[in-house]
Each structure stands twice: as C-alpha cells, then as structure tokens.
Image (cartoon, grey):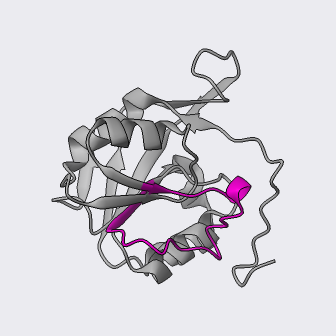
Amino acid sequence: MNKYNFNFNKNDVEWYTKKTDILKFLELAKIDKTKTIWCPFDNKNSNFVKVLKEQGYNIIYSHISLDQDFYKYEPKQKYDLIISNPPFKGKSQTLKRLIQLNKPFAMIYGIQCFNSGGFVKELKNVKNLQLIFLNKRMQFFKESENEKGSCSFHSLWICNDLLDRKLIIE
C-alpha cells in the first residue's frame, strides 16, 4: 500500500485507447514537439507510446507491470508533461499524484468521474484546469484493436496547464 491509499492489482483488466482518439487529442492540444512526454500507465506496445513517437515526440513510458508504480515512481529523465489513460480505479488518487508532480498533464477520464466527491474535491487543486469534452463516446479495447472485447463510454480529457484555453468542446 502506498501513501495514496490505493492498491493496484496487477491482474486488473487493462483497456487501451484507440490511435484515432490520441491523434484527435494531439490535433486539439497542439503540443510543442520539443517537449518530452511521460506516459506513466503505458508500455512499449501502448498506442500512446506508438502514436506519440510516430508524431515526433520524445517519450518516456512506465507501467506497473515493469515495477514502475505511478504512485511511487517518477522517471529520472527530465520530462515536461504527462499524458495517458489512467486506470479506472483510483481516479482521485491519480489526480492527487498528478497535482503533486506539478507538471502539465492530460488524462482521459470517463464523464462519470464528476460523480465522485473525492475527485471533484481534488479538481479544485489543479493549478490551471482545462477540459476537452468529446462529441462521441471513446471506444477502448483489450490487447488489439481487432479484438472483439471492447467498451465505449463518454469520456473527456482533463488537463492542467497544457491547452491554449480552458474549455474545448469537440
């Protein structure tokens, strides 16, 4: 257990973000390509790592399966911002850790995150809160985009100090 009182089970099912959704985010966010991005919930096969590299960004990635627990780990390499799709569990703890790291960030959350009092309370601590609301449900998948196991739900990007405006409605 860590100081965030959140226990991640390595056997939890992971759902991955589609490449098209990452590309859409990059189109809206207009991130400087000289920035180094840490993807803290990703491995080398993650679409975040693949797409960001393909788009010319310098990437650092880490994952619990590599014994790099986001709640305890921080890369030794210099990084400028954090982008990923965090675990569904522990939304407020993830946000609290992001605030502690004091870097610009963008994370995908299901719209239902606003039903969590703890999460909303943490949002008040985000230095420069910015939101990207999407006009369609994001679809998430297991292992391969061709695999039948997929789910979709309304999602948004919650950002800190990353966008050129507070609110983007796509």
Query: Which percent across, then down, holds residue 90?
Result: 68, 64
Q: Does the magenta stretch include residue 8?
A: no
Segment tinted magenta in the rendering: 60-83
Q: Residue at x 72, y 63 (%)?
A: 67
- Residue 136 visible in the snapshot: no
Query: Quadrant of the image for the N terminus?
Result: bottom right
77 relative to 61, above or below: below
For the question of whether residue 26 can be seen, the reply is yes
Q: Give 72 or 137, whichever is nearer the viewer.
A: 72
Above or below, 30 against 149 in this view is below
Query: Viewed as shown, does residue 89 lie left or right of 114?
Result: right
55 and 94: which is toward the camera: 55
Please identify the quarter of the rendering in which residue 20 is found: top left
For residue 169, above or below residue 78: above
- Frontmost residue, 86 versus 40: 40
Task: Check residue 80 for magenta coloring.
Answer: yes
Q: Is residue 9 left or right of residue 25?
A: right
Q: Which residue is drawn at 55% across and 47% down?
A: 110
Q: Residue at x 57, y 21 (%)?
A: 145
Against 27, residue 98 (above or below) is below
Q: Toward which corner of the image does residue 102 lie, by quadrant?
A: bottom left
Position of residue 150 measured from the top left corner of the image (x, y, whole percent): 65, 24
**Quarter of the image that includes the C terminus:** top left
Q: What residue occupies the far front of the structure in this picture?
A: 77
In the image, 123: left or right of 33? right
* Residue 141 percent across, percent down from the top left: 62, 28
